[in-house]
Amino acid sequence: MAISKLLIASFLISFLVFRHLAQADQSTGSSATPPANAPPANAPPPVGVGAPPAKIDCPGACGARCKLSKRPNLCQRACGSCCSRCNCVPPGTSGNYGVCPCYASLTTRGNRRKCP
């Protein structure tokens, strides 16, 4: 008998909670009309917002990065791998890792920098 009373009470409480939530949803103004300053639904996003960044020319950027390397083929291969992941190559022939944090954070299995 106690279990049935508990079951009925829990159904009653859940019904009241759901009813309260439904009323709260209606009172918050969830209408179908957008605010006056909202852009149209079919408008493209603003430039630089929501769009992926433009792809850079990895072979050209890595060629410039590796032009003074003692091992240009190894440098080009590593730089190309990093560029394809990060879509960024720091300027100059060495250093400047602060410009591309992703490029600087890639490491080998031995915890050495992967990217030249």
Image: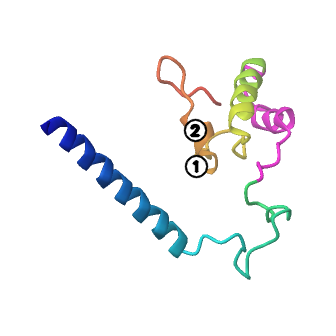
Secondary structure beneath dot 2 equals helix
Q: Label 1 is placed on what type of residue?
A: Gly
**Quick check: is 45 in the magenta stretch?**
no
The residue positioned 58% from the left and 75% from the top of the image is: 29
Query: Where 76 falls versus 98 (above or below)?
Result: above
The residue positioned 72% from the left and 24% from the top of the image is: 75
Question: Is residue 52 found left or right of 102 in the rendered image?
Answer: right
Residue situated in front as seen by the camera: 67 or 12: 12
Looking at the image, the residue that sits furthest to the front is 1
- Classed neighbour count for the residue bearing mark 1: other residues with Cα under 10 Å, few (<14), some (14–19), many (≥20): few
The residue positioned 85% from the left and 65% from the top of the image is: 43
Residue 22 coordinates in the image, percent (x, y) = 48, 63
Mark 1 and mark 2: span between their CA atoms?
A: 7 Å
Residues in magenta?
Answer: 51-72
Mark 1 = which residue? 98
Badge number at residue 104: 2
Residue 79 lies in quadrant: top right
- Classed neighbour count for the residue bearing mark 2: other residues with Cα under 10 Å, few (<14), some (14–19), many (≥20): many
Q: Label 2 is placed on what type of residue?
A: Ala
